[in-house]
Amino acid sequence: MLDISVLQELFAKQKDEVFQDFFSFLRFKSIATDPNYDDEVEACADWVSSYLKGYGLSVEKWETGRAPVIFASDLRAGPEKETLLLYCHYDVQPVDPLEEWLSPPFEPTIRDGEVYARGAVDNKGQCFYTLVAIKTLLKQLGQLSVNLKIVIEGEEESGSVGLSKILEEKREALKADYLLIVDSGVYKLEEPAITLGARGITCMEVSVQEADYDLHSGMAGGMAYNPNRALAEMLSKLHHEDGSVAIPGFNDEVIEIAPREKEALCFKFDPVQFHTLFGFEPTGMETGFTPTEACSLRPTLEINGMWGGYTGPGFKTIVPATAHAKLSCRLVPDQVPERITALVRDFLISNTPKGLKTKVEIFKGSGRGFRTNPGSRIAQLMTESYTQVFQKPCKKILMGGTIPIAVELAETAKAEMLLVGLALPGDHIHAPNEHFGLDRFEQGYLTICRTLELFG
Amino acid sequence: MLDISVLQELFAKQKDEVFQDFFSFLRFKSIATDPNYDDEVEACADWVSSYLKGYGLSVEKWETGRAPVIFASDLRAGPEKETLLLYCHYDVQPVDPLEEWLSPPFEPTIRDGEVYARGAVDNKGQCFYTLVAIKTLLKQLGQLSVNLKIVIEGEEESGSVGLSKILEEKREALKADYLLIVDSGVYKLEEPAITLGARGITCMEVSVQEADYDLHSGMAGGMAYNPNRALAEMLSKLHHEDGSVAIPGFNDEVIEIAPREKEALCFKFDPVQFHTLFGFEPTGMETGFTPTEACSLRPTLEINGMWGGYTGPGFKTIVPATAHAKLSCRLVPDQVPERITALVRDFLISNTPKGLKTKVEIFKGSGRGFRTNPGSRIAQLMTESYTQVFQKPCKKILMGGTIPIAVELAETAKAEMLLVGLALPGDHIHAPNEHFGLDRFEQGYLTICRTLELFG
């Protein structure tokens, strides 16, 4: 097994080239959720494919109808060895509000050792250190001691609709013993951790309509039931005062975590660090839960977007014809996305004031939440890897976010699944000024190198 | 006095030129509420000024810091005669949602005898028939039997801030016996009417902030108090279930209309016509009021715009840092805009959930509501004019909308004030596809001609 210091030397030698390639990867505007960027998404997929081919992996481009999936493999370890499936994604979140970026989101810029760009962490940064680790080991060792499969998809941020569609057809190709999703984080670098679960998701858009077109608020104000008012009233009924979701049946499948399971997990919350990073004190928790518990053990219903009427400069005195909101739920294991979506939709429709019409559009790409058994081999290997690289005990945490395809992919591959990664709470994921440390890039590379070798 | 048929002939002779000029007027993108259109606003003011100079009026351009005010006068009737001050405006509402316009908003297009353009009615159409009436009479008679003053401002749609600022300085110039505001409408052309009052207005923008920037809804969802949720909950408290405004003290100055005063007014509401025009049945009225009563005798609090988080295509799973709403109140006489604004602001701030900050920006350009005494000379003259032109009895109505400067202007001029105009409920004022009938343009011209002569 190569010494960590050897892996560090190997990294140092290729550093300039690695970051040059990483920045090329970051320059693609691969916002798959917005059809305006389809060409950039395609070009980014092709770039990933070329990169993987460049170091001798067998690479396939799987068409999905939208963003292609890049699949690569190296099965030279042989059928008697275990198979590891790695999962990353090359698509990124939209960039607005654009005016809040200190440097352009698709022009990677280094400040204080951090690279600022959309996707710097989520997931291009984590994806690319994974690829660099594989490349380096293959070059150095000639062959790995584990059969390797890599799936890098382009619709993670919009629900993995394309990958989900072709899973059945690719069942044989995806078969693996372990699924390692490199798209997670830790609370602090001094406390390395593996992630033993993530929440699921379901997304929808609600539209409330009254008149055929916007009305003059002098003429109609007082007689029309303003759709903004109607929507605000409907949305205000979604939560109880104690912070829990008020839709009947929403929490029926939420199972309380067993005390022993809970004890094994770290739910640390540092209010000072949090305030420094985000500028507020969290107050949205359900009564009885700490902030970290609330955003991992409990489901949510969030209003991700809301709009109606005039929102430009100055004033426009209208009663708008329509008002809209984008809603998403984060789900805990056992909550079925389709059932929750139907509950939210029916609740909104039944709470619509007389005279207005409510439509709910359900987005494709929901996903279930999951938990990983801490005793599984993949969890133990990664724990060992993180402990060696960081020279600290490795904790076990849960993630509040979602890998929409995770459960389906693990079921298809018949693999034990684990989430890992080195994102930090202050990385501005999904926000303006997303950034990733170049030192963390190297540490990520080390963790993947070490894990691949530990399989041996 | 010229016969109506003579006035019609005079109109027919110059029709092509009149409409050509009218369309030039409509082509200016004079959206004064949006600073991006400052040049168009200025150019439009200059065009109005040139037009008025073209027929011999003494014209002044009053600078206000923003949109200039065009003031013209013809005082040749002499000091022993009465003075009439006419008020119109050349600014228009914003045009969004642009995609809903069937023809471009600043390219006047005739369909079925109606001209479609932003400002076609409000107020360029009504302003221009007024100017054509004056021009025609001056040309035909050489001189009027009333001293005439005309003020055409450029910030009516954004609260007349500039005109308000210079009123004191222009007190002498504005002095008049009567103030006629040509910016109102009728329910139906078969029921001509003068408008004996309008509501006041006050506008504000509320912003709710939590984090310093948008958060990942997986990471923060369940711990953050989503500002969209907070705002929806705050806005949902603005109204009682019976439709009345729920802010303590909001209705304290609302005086019930005396039965005799109410009897003299027409509050007719035609549900079939309304549904045909607007596609819905009004359900937002306060309990105990008909639709027409609700939107003229009662104050309102409307959410004209509301936005927070991601509103683009697809999905972005964030907890936004901020959420916003534009609110306006229509006020009845005796409600003081400043007092109402403070009540709304304090209510919103005191209903902000813990952990969030609410800021309320108060827009300049509030205005008081008013009522005109039906026995006043200006009301009687206009009633006579409308009766003669339409050959129907002239009704008395109230307007739900606002002329922000009306009360201040009337007080400065020491004039008896009246509102008139020929807008119809289906004209799409403030909405896409605003339109005005070319036949109504001529009828409007006739009413102003006849009124000017009736002063004689």
Image (cartoon, coloured by chain):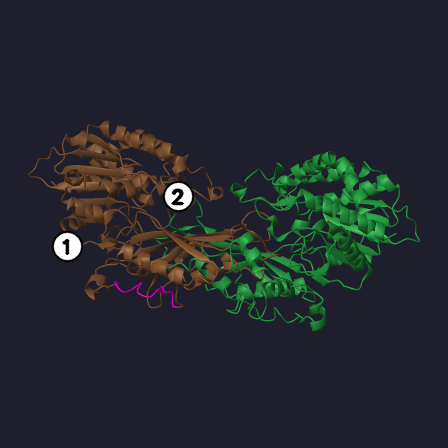
Chain colours: A green, B brown
- What is the quadrant of the C terminus of chain B in the image? top left
Quick check: B429 above or below A292?
above
To which residue does mark 1 refer? Answer: B375
Point out which mark residue A151 bears.
Answer: none
Boundaries of the magenta span: B242-254
Rendered location of residue A284, percent (x, y): 53, 63
Query: From the viewer's perspective, is B213 left or right of A406?
Result: left
Identify the residue under disc 2.
B434
Provide residue A382's location: percent of width, then percent of height: 78, 55
Given the image, what chain letter belongs to the residue carrying mark 2? B
Q: Which of marks 2 and 1 is nearer the N terminus?
A: 1
Q: Is residue B383 visible from the viewing direction of this image?
A: yes
User: Subunit of mark 1?
Assistant: B
Toward the viewer: B104 or A227? A227
Magenta stretch secondary structure, dominant: loop
Q: Which amino acid does label 1 sit on?
A: Gly
Circle 2: residue type: Glu
Q: Does the stretch in magenta take in B250?
A: yes
> How far from the left and from the top, in percent, is residue A69?
75, 45
Q: Residue A175, how many percent across, how many down?
A: 84, 54
User: Number of marks in the image?
Assistant: 2
| Element type at mark 1 | loop
